[in-house]
Amino acid sequence: MTSVKPIYDLVILLDPELEQDTRAKILEDTRAAIEAQGELLRQEHWGEKQLSYPIDHKAVADYQLLQLHATPELLAGLERTLKITDGVLRFRIIKLAPGVPQPSAAADANGSQAPTARAGAGEGGEPGPSHAAAPEAPGASAASEQQGAPAPAPATPEVAEPA
């Protein structure tokens, strides 16, 4: 039985205020490390995008995606190197779930990629918490809407007292 090599996504957020040569050097060093100990499958430049919140007082970052096959040693080396590299605002290494299809060329062209399943959300491929909702039982939606509210009393007919 052949073992399937796991695929990792490495997303790097670079400081857009850096010179283009400096950003290219960071990416070239990262590619060289990957090619020395693993296999680079794909590299994409996603361009400069607005951040959800400022990182190091920066509101925009230059996004780069690298897909690769890697050994645990390579992942640890990349993590160590990218943490101390000036100009890297953030990075994330994500292990893709087996069997996740690659985005199609049409999805890449119009920028609307379908969400992909991830095996873990931690750096270095560590499994993250599962946020999948469990299926609800019939009638459970009404109970979940009233969480914390007291249950209504059963309806009883009003009885008028004699005067």
Image: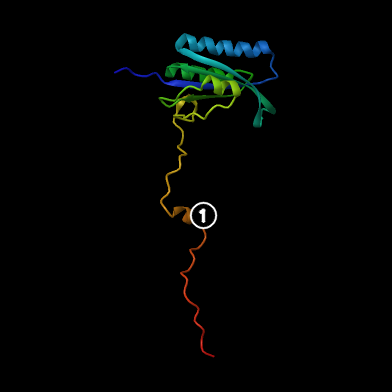
Q: How many marks?
A: 1
Residue situated furthest bottom in the rendering: 163
**Residue, x 48% and y 63% (percent of image)?**
151
Q: Of residues 127 and 62, which is closer to you in this image?
A: 62
Quarter of the image that includes the N terminus: top left
Residue 132 position by quadrant:
top left
* Residue 150 x %, y %: 50, 63
Q: Nearer the viewer, residue 132 or 74?
A: 132
The reply to whether residue 11 is in sight is no
Check disc 1 and give the amino acid type: Glu
Percent of width and height locating residue 91: 56, 23
Q: Residues within 10 Å of mark 1 (few under 14, many from 20)?
A: few
Residue 63 locus on image (x, y percent): 61, 22
Describe the colour scheme in one phrase: rainbow
Where does label 1 land, which residue? 145
Q: Farthest residue in the front direction?
A: 106
| In this view, 136 is above or below 37 | below
How far across and how far down the image is residue 80, in percent?
52, 19
Q: Is residue 53 left or right of residue 82?
A: right
- The relative height of residue 54 versus residue 29 in the rendered view (above or below) is below
Q: SS at mark 1? A: helix
> Can the viewer see residue 59?
yes
- Quadrant of the rendered structure where residue 13 is? top right
Q: Is residue 128 above or below residue 86?
A: below
Q: Quadrant of the C terminus?
A: bottom right
Taking the image as shown, residue 47 lies to the left or right of residue 116, namely: right
What's the residue at 48%, 76% (across, down)?
157
Q: Write the residue at 51% across / 89% down.
A: 162
